[in-house]
Image: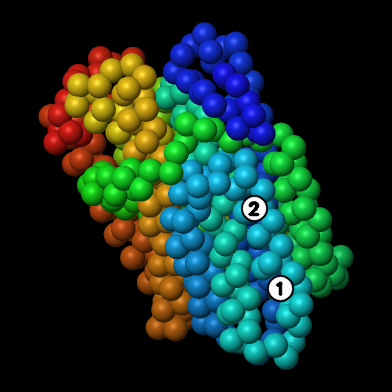
Amino acid sequence: MTARGRWIQQWDPEDETFWNRTGERIARRNLLFSVLSEHIGFSIWTMWSVLVLFMGPEYGLTPADKFLLTSLVTLVGAVVRVPYTFAVAVFGGRNWTIISAGLLLVPTVAAFAVMEPGTSFSTFLLVGLLAGIGGGNFASSMTNINAFFPLRKKGWALGLNAGGGNIGVPVIQLVALAIIGASGGPRVLLGLYIPLIVVAAVLAALYMDNLASVKNDTGAAKDAARDPHTWIMSFLYIGTFGSFIGYSFAFGQVLQNQFDRTPLEAAYVTFIGPLLGSLIRPLGGWLADRYGGARITLWNFVGMGAATAVLIAASMAQSLALFTVAFVGLFVLTGLGNGSTYKMIPGIFQAKAHALGLEGEAAAAYGRRLSGASMGLIGAVGALGGVGINLAFRQSFLSYGSGTGAFVAFLACYAVCFAVTWAVYLRRPAARSAGVTPATEEKPQLSYAEV
């Protein structure tokens, strides 16, 4: 292995001697600073989930306006994940982390400039769209870290990377709670993040690396887009991550509009769900490593359906305590499912490599190539679930004056996710691969049609 200008020319994490001697240390260092940049990216992406809590009647926005605003922010964050995924191959993981972290200054400074009563709704929409670029950091970070770790460690590494990034959601909500409690304004919140963005970019420049083996491969993107499992996993990720990010934007607004909570009262509890959902994501990846991603994902959708049923009952009964507990429980399950679904991705493409007769490093390289390319598409489509959730809440409040109608739709979605997971990845003689079956089971050499 040689390093030149922060470029590592040779990288083979599947070689245990290489991994134990130098690979693990380098991979962990890159993971640490990747998490930091992604963490701040999530905070900037979701800052409008708390900025809308500051926006009282003097701003002249209706609840429907606020749900539309957060929907569009989520939409941009989903769309930019596709180019961010392939930017790693064009610029290098370290280089793109520096660039993407620096870009976060644009929406933060813009929001700082316009955040005051009297600003038009169209201006808020435009500035909110800029914040969506923070959502792209997840895709580039996951693609980069996927290349650093061996298959046997991907569930843990990707879960930790994503979980550490997801924590950016509750952290900015906690900071907002402290500022609201101290009678501060939204510009105080934004001012705190501007120097943090600079720090993240500088640390990435000092301590991260580029992998020369990660080449710009447009063929991989085309192959991933043609593979049906990319779109099946995208749908499942709508159910897990789409729920997480959608609820993160909507939780505080639902509490305000349905249970008449003040901004401070809403902020006291909105951070709890995203925090627990983020912290538990690595556990979802670890459980998938141990018991199989599809198995954990399947039962996780059962739990999400049960929690949603409780939310419907609590919403109809106007029970704030039961509603809050069930919502936090649903957040926890979205985090578990995020970890288990992402672990499935490299395992599925590794199984395809074996089915094609590839072994050893050739199989690992094939799996990394397609899984890295597919992660951007899966992450983008999955994040679109957050758009759907906010639009569903908007329509539900317009039609029924509560979120009950939206929760009924979500329950139906989780039922379909359960059925798809079982039919494609668990129904015998459906294929089982390293990422979707327990590591202790014998793995049959199956054709791609059986995966």
Residue 315: x %, y % from top left: 47, 67
Q: Is disc 2 placed on a helix, strand or loop?
A: helix
Q: Amino acid at mark 1?
A: Ala
**Residue 206, labelled with which disc?**
none
Q: How is the image coloured?
A: rainbow
Give me the C-alpha separation between circle 1 and circle 2: 20 Å
The reply, left or right, for residue 137 in relation to residue 379 is right
**Residue 111, labelled with which disc?**
1
Q: Compared with residue 317, is residue 96 higher up or lower down, i.e. above or below?
A: above
Quadrant of the rendering where the N terminus is positioned? top right
Q: Amino acid at mark 2?
A: Ile
The reply, left or right, for residue 156 in relation to residue 182 is left
Q: Residue tagged by mark 2?
A: 99
Q: Compared with residue 360, is residue 169 higher up or lower down, i.e. above or below?
A: below
Closer to the eye: label 1 or 2: 2
> How many neighbours does mark 2 have within 10 angstroms: few (below 14), some (14-19), or many (20 or more)?
some
**Residue under the image location 64 percent in, 53 percent down:** 99
Res. 220 image quadrant: top left
Q: Compared with residue 390, is residue 248 higher up or lower down, i.e. above or below?
A: above
Q: 257 or 450, which lies in front?
A: 450
Q: 397 or 122, which lies in front?
A: 122
> How many neighbours does mark 1 have within 10 angstroms: few (below 14), some (14-19), or many (20 or more)?
many
The reply, left or right, for residue 193 in relation to residue 10 is right
Q: Is disc 1 placed on a helix, strand or loop?
A: helix
Residue 444: x %, y % from top left: 20, 19
Q: Compared with residue 346, is residue 402 higher up or lower down, i.e. above or below?
A: below
Q: Which sits earlier in the primary sequence, circle 1 or circle 2?
A: 2
Residue 42: x %, y % from top left: 61, 54
Residue 37: x %, y % from top left: 66, 47
**Residue under the image location 46 percent in, 49 percent down:** 86
